[in-house]
Amino acid sequence: MATLVINAGFPILLPIYFFSRNQESSDTKQVSSATLATVYISFGIFLAAVSMLYAVGLWILPVSIYTLICASQLGFNALFSFFLNSQKLTPFILNSIALLTISSMLLVFAPDDSLDSSTDNNKYALGFLCTLGASAGYALLLALTQLYFQKIIKTTTFRVVVDMTICQCAVATCVVLIALFVSGEWKTMHREMREFELGSVSYVMILVWTAVFWQVFAIGVIALIYKVSSLFSNVICALGFPVVLVLAVFILNDKMNGVKVISLVLAILGLVSYLYQHYLDDLKAKAKSIDVNQASEPLSKP
């Protein structure tokens, strides 16, 4: 169910889809339907698998540890972007990758009081590996999405963002629904809703609004890839990790120990390192733009 709601909210984007129909460009029309279908189906199946890994990790691990491991996706994304998107790996970006990797690895040594008493070491290891695998898989999906925009679509309309979001989420939803019925888990849904502590109405509303906000997140992520890069999109995602970690302590009574504090500090330093590199790149771009304008001024005079 958790995997399903991550992707099942795509119908709320249909009004945007129909509104953006007049933005379809000639570049999009030149791409064959078979190519588009292959990309959307492949990405959708991949997204379903990654969503499942995220759901398993969140089911086993405390929110604080889960969030810190998710921060490693920025490092994975930098590596995939280097090979797939020709992303430059400067010293600040490499420093960011190192800090975020160490931040996640520290959580292997988290003391037992950070886990529920019913969670054994094998189950904790499974949760760790699933979350780490999901982070790597999602980072790869972002890099492949940027490659898709660069090499296949090559268009300048927002329509491609909406198409990608709706189509891959629709495919992922179908895959998860098939798994839901094949596994027989659908038979327990009514009992789960009836026994929900806050009531059936709250159960339904939580699912609905979770699905809605995940779609807002999805279209925002893909739009940032389209406008800037997959790495920048991942950095914006990572900005929310420290917030989740702090909220988990106050709202969910998650325990905060020394290892997790150190891991959090390293994750924040890794994030700051990348943001500083982006700041330097922005300064260089502005300086280059000024130089070009100044060089062209004499040519425009009579």
Image: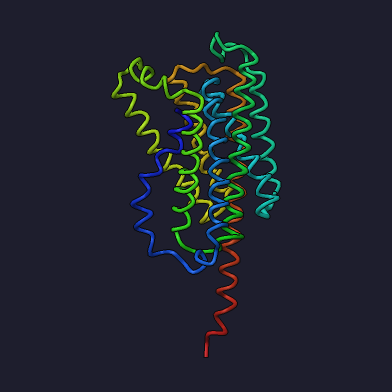
Residue at left offset 39%, top offset 38%:
213
Compared to residue 18, the image places residue 181 above or below, namely above
What quarter of the picture does the N terminus occupy? top left
Query: Residue 100 at x, y = what percent?
Result: 64, 34
Looking at the picture, tell me which residue is in the foreground, 219 or 168: 168
* Residue that appears at 51% across and 38% down: 239
Toward the left, the furthest residue is: 201
**In the image, is residue 200 above or below residue 20?**
above
In terms of depth relative to the viewer, which is nearer, 223 or 298?
Answer: 223
The part of the image, by quadrant, that contains residue 115 is top right
Q: Position of residue 298 (x, y in %)?
A: 57, 83
116 left or right of 19 in image: right
Pinpoint residue 191: horizontal percent, then vertical percent: 37, 17
In the image shown, does 115 or 95 lie closer to the viewer? 115
Residue at 56 percent across and 15 percent down: it is 114
**Count of numbered labels shown in the rendering:** 0
